[in-house]
Image: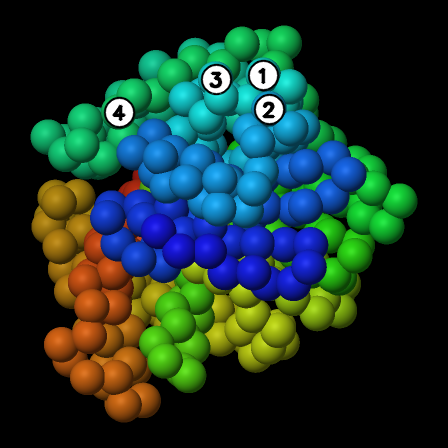
Amino acid sequence: MSIYRIDSRISLVDLMDLSLKERTGSYILNEEALTVIETSASPSIPHLKKGLSKLNINPEDIQYIILTHIHLDHAGGAGLFLKECPNARIIVHPKGKRHLIDPTRLITGAKAVYGDKFEELFHPIVPIPEDRINVMAHGEQLSLSEGCTLTFYHTPGHANHHISIYDSASNGMFTGDTCGIQYTIGSKRFYFPSTSPNQFDPEQMRNSISMYRSLNLDRLYFGHYGVTEEVSFALSEVEKWLDLFMEKSEGKYSAHVTMEENIKAITTLLYELTSNELVQKGIEPDNPVFRLLQLDMNVSAMGIVDYLNKRHKGDHSS
């Protein structure tokens, strides 16, 4: 577990999701209203608590725990962590609230994807009392101090229950998975979209990224993983790769094979595209990032196949 102090206000605690470094993290906003953005899954909560201790933060002083969306690698540990934070309130998209109160569908969906690994990766998923949850409308604001106001934006594309959080003090956006994943390898950075099931929609993702661009941001705070100040480049890279993912996947997809066969074929395709990019930019093939990339491209393939299945059947709802 490590801590990265971004500036005097914001720290990033590595939550060691999947026991991997720089996979997911919690952003700690040291404002008058002490705020945590993202918790990751329950096995990450000991890392979060240790990080807070190193920052000399008492969980009892936390006022807000903000979840960009309710996928378990971002929010699965929220209920468990809330037990340590008696004065905190959870903030989530309106569509995410009911799943935090009753996580049955979250658990069922995760078991369908992760199978026998579910317990190791996500247990326990603790329900959250309704009276501890605040929902944020698109454009709604929350003041953390005289110098810091957060603005919440509904940013579908990765998920319908996704919010992004604009921080006025740094002119930065906490992105969750809206504009993809940042891989930092030494001095090199790579940006790829995250197209996981089952609400992925490429057009909505493009619209959300366009909204980011219109705000002339100075920083992006990624859920996976870390901060960048090369905002325009990062957004352009995610858009470029999203277009390529969709173009190549549509060519590979077949309505005449099983979903599993499509996922396997498109996982291989996406991994070849992205791993070749890393190798061409000088990343050695034995670098641990390739394990992350394999995991991420498999999940992204699941989302793309799900989207293409729905489109093939004429179902544009998600």
Q: Quadrant of residue 130?
A: top right
Viewer-nearest residue: 221 or 309? 221
The label number, if any, that marks residue 86 in the structure image: 1
Q: Secondary structure at mark 1?
A: loop
Circle 4: residue type: His
For the point 14% across and 34% down, which residue is it? Answer: 117
Give the residue number, with chain letter if any, for mark 2: 60
Circle 2: residue type: Glu
For the point 43% across and 77% down, which residue is it? Answer: 189
For the point 40% across and 56% down, which residue is it? Answer: 2
The label number, if any, that marks residue 123 in the structure image: 4
- At label 2, counting other C-alpha atoms closer than 10 Å, the crowd grade (few under 14, some 14-19, many 20 or more) is some
Circle 3: residue type: Lys
Q: Quadrant of residue 109?
A: top left
- The reply to whether dot 2 and dot 1 touch (C-beta < 8 Å) is yes
Viewer-nearest residue: 64 or 161? 64
Mark 2 or mark 4, which is nearer to you? 2
User: What is the spatial separation of the Cα atoms under label 4 and label 3, in whole angstroms?
Assistant: 15 Å
Q: Earlier in the sequence, mark 4 or mark 1?
A: 1
Mark 3 or mark 2, which is nearer to you? 2
Establish if 87 lies above or below 248. Answer: above
Q: Earlier in the sequence, mark 2 or mark 1?
A: 2
- The reply to whether dot 3 and dot 1 touch (C-beta < 8 Å) is no
Q: Secondary structure at mark 2?
A: helix
Give the residue number, with chain letter if any, for mark 3: 83
- At label 4, counting other C-alpha atoms closer than 10 Å, the crowd grade (few under 14, some 14-19, many 20 or more) is some
Mark 4 or mark 3, which is nearer to you? 3
